[in-house]
Image (tube, grey):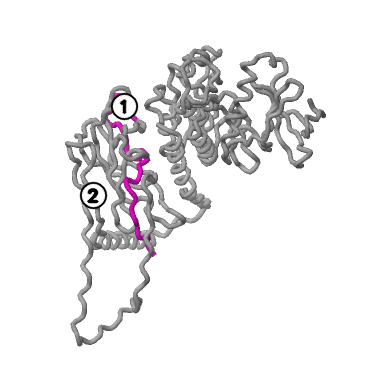
Amino acid sequence: MTGRTIQQYEILEKLGSGAMGHVYKARDTRLHRFVAIKALAFGKLADDDLRLRFLQEARAASALNHPNIITIHDILSVDGADFLVMEYVPGKTLADLIPKGGMSAREVLDYGTQMANALAAAHKAGVVHRDIKPGNIMVSETGTVKVLDFGLAKQIDSSHRMELTAEGAILGTAAYMAPEQAEGKKASPRSDIFSFGAILHEMITGRQAFSGESHASILDAVRRDPPRRLSELVADVPAGLEELVAKCLDKNPETRWGNTDDLHAALSALKGRQDTGISAPPPPAPAPVSAAPPPDRTLLIVAAALLLALIAGAVWWKTSKPEPRVDPIMIPPVSRETDRPSPVAPLTPLPEPAAPAPGAPAQPAVPGTEGPKAAAKPVTLPDGYPIPLLLETPVTKGLDDGASLRLTAASDIAIEGVRLVAKGAQAAGFVGQGKKKFLRGRSVMIGFQAVRAVDGTPVRLRATSEAGKEPLRGAEVSGSKSGDAILATSGTSYLAYVDGKVEIVPKR
């Protein structure tokens, strides 16, 4: 193929091969740009089913206009052969980039957020990829992720009859295949989420989540064996990432992430925390020890006396200083008749200053307050906006229905550069009995009530991105085992959503 010209495309070099055919770099002589051309393997041209799937890739991918999905330019049929003309992305696949010991947390969250964004767009358009794997993820030289190869994609909408494989046929790559796919069942967006979780696991650890000596043994591991926890394989996994990946890799599709929008929002929140986190500086190197004459005993006694005096003064100052007052979020207990909390009690406004009596002399102005400042313009926090939270109160088996939980905002929440909720802001939730089973028979569920905005406004929260849905969610396990009394430890991360838009006055 190299050196051949197909219409206006001059074939320059072979880039690689896959199950669907060979990929070449070419030059568009008409538009003067480089493109990638996928050619169906010539030995398989007689396979009508393969040819239809090849054309299906073009139709599925060309409908997805997204910066993290490869752009399809054209479809060609020349001398009985089919060619797919695509955007050329200089870079490497994720399979080539993942090192033996795994990627850095920053790279994992950066690439992972972009991949989740691409999958969310595809699923909204009704397309399931069904073959998400590192070899189908291209990373450009500038760090932009592009999802490739929708050759196995199918349309979810039954009005578009493009599915070409009957139930019982197994398509995909074994190590990244969801259990339901390995059993020959129909794939869904949650199947892509499982495959995505397997990629995240490999990016973090440098090894596949599921392995075996044969295709059959890998499929068996996918169906039955839980992957090893990330913290057992690598150190310093960012808080919340281990639980996020574990939820992707749940064998039961119903208890995985419900949709890729929520998954993308959770990854974005983790990435925001990683980007803004400040690590502690390394401890100073110890001073070199040099031979010196023994110190004078009198000087040692004087130095010790001074040190004791300083410590005594610090203790006196600390105990005599009044503790700062912390205003809690005023939230009444949960109603037992419903699984939702009662309305958030309004905060008591400060009294207005009394107006001066007629004829009274003007009071002298306090320095710095000579004139009123213009009030800040309120900013609307929209309904359904994601708020990442960290649990402070551990969730245990012994907590009663309706018990209060303390949480904090995991990161700043800002709209158009205006901070509306500060990192560490106080939040509140509760324990409730949900209808869904969770964690293999355990049914402890939690809900969210409110978080304190920068102006003191309690922002109501709910547990799902859609209003009116199940108000509770399972208490995600964080480092506990099935027999432990603690189901979720302090520091477990959750994603709550604003329950009804609210206006917040930002601090000036």
Task: State the image quarter where residue 1 is shown.
Answer: top right
Name the residue nearer the viewer: 237 or 210.
210
Kind of residue sitting beneath label 1: Phe
Residue 212 position in % (x across, y down): 53, 16
Q: Check disc 2: other Cα within 10 Å, few if <14, some if 14-19, many if 20+.
A: some
Residue 223 position in % (x across, y down): 45, 17
Residue contact at pointers 2 and 1, CB within 8 angstroms = no
Q: Badge 2 is on which residue?
A: 344
457 vs 229: above or below? below
Q: Badge 1 is on which residue?
A: 438
| Magenta stretch, residue numbers | 480-508
Q: Secondary structure at mark 1?
A: strand
Name the residue nearer the viewer: 442 or 348.
348
* Cα–Cα gap, marks 2 and 1: 28 Å
Query: Residue visible at 50% across and 24% down?
Result: 209
Q: Secondary structure at mark 2?
A: loop
Q: Is residue 185 visible?
A: yes
Query: Residue visible at 49% across and 13% down?
Result: 168
